[in-house]
Amino acid sequence: MTDDLAELERIAGALVQSLSSAERRSLMRRMARDLTLSQRQRIAAQKQPDGAGFTPRKTKQAPISGRGATCFLYPSGGGGEPRRVIMKSFTWSTGRMMTGFDIEAGAIRSFEFDKVVKWLPVPDEYRNAGGGTLRRRGGLRRRAMFRRLASARFLRSQANDQGFWVGFSGKAAAVANIHHYGLRDKPSLRSKAVPYPKRQLIGATNIDREVMLDLLFTTLASQANA
């Protein structure tokens, strides 16, 4: 099937030159639009172009503490070993910050949620049986990966009478590149670089190529019958 498509694409490349510049531009825009939609749907389905599923996220230990108290390891200011923090009566504030009474410091402190090294069980003497479970905002980690990256804001296309492209640009391209090729990156500013699994975000499937060829032949047929 792939060899057949390659031959068809070779023929299509020659046929498309018979179209006028305006006709080619219109065709390329339609191809770009359809391929962008196909890419978005495939990413939403968590599939790579070859049909294999994306490597799932690593399961992170969920926060164990109740709203009345929480316990975790947090980077120390001097760059040494993370210290254990037992925080009572904490609340959320803007920017994914937890603010509450730090028992060891004996004062109210704020901590960045994303910098927590590890969540620990709350010692029995600090447990609040009536506290609710601490949950990540909006259940983000339970959602499909790359939902925002694949939105119309970041997954874009452009076309002219010579061809078209579908992909990411700017900062979104840098993020997509890391996941697409399975590169290393820091999850946060103070963390170490870690390798990310290769999850191919952009790529035409055989069905995509068939759809684009159908568009070309339909356009050529309509021009012949005009």
Image (cartoon, rainbow, N blue to C red):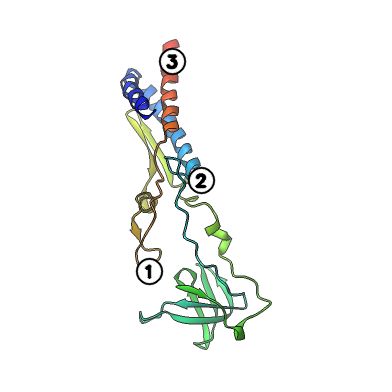
Residue highlighted by disc 2: 44
Q: x, y (%) of residue 23?
A: 39, 22
Q: Is 203 on the left or on the right of 111, as rendered?
A: left
Mark 1 is on which residue type? Answer: Ser
Inspect this view and state whether residue 57 appears. yes
Residue highlighted by disc 1: 191
Point out the tag, 1 or 3, that comes first from the N-terminus: 1
Q: Which mark is residue 221?
A: 3
Residue density around tag 1, few if under 14, some if 14–19, many if 20 or more, within 10 Å: few
Point out the tag, 3 or 2, that comes first from the N-terminus: 2
Residue density around tag 2, few if under 14, some if 14–19, many if 20 or more, within 10 Å: some
Q: x, y (%) of residue 108?
A: 53, 83
Mark 3 is on which residue type? Answer: Ala
Query: Is 59 in front, or is 73?
Result: 59
Q: What residue sits 51% from the left and 71% below the top?
A: 97
Q: x, y (%) of residue 69?
A: 59, 79
Point out the tag, 2 or 1, that comes first from the N-terminus: 2
Mark 2 is on which residue type? Answer: Ala
Q: CA distance from mark 3 to mark 2?
A: 34 Å
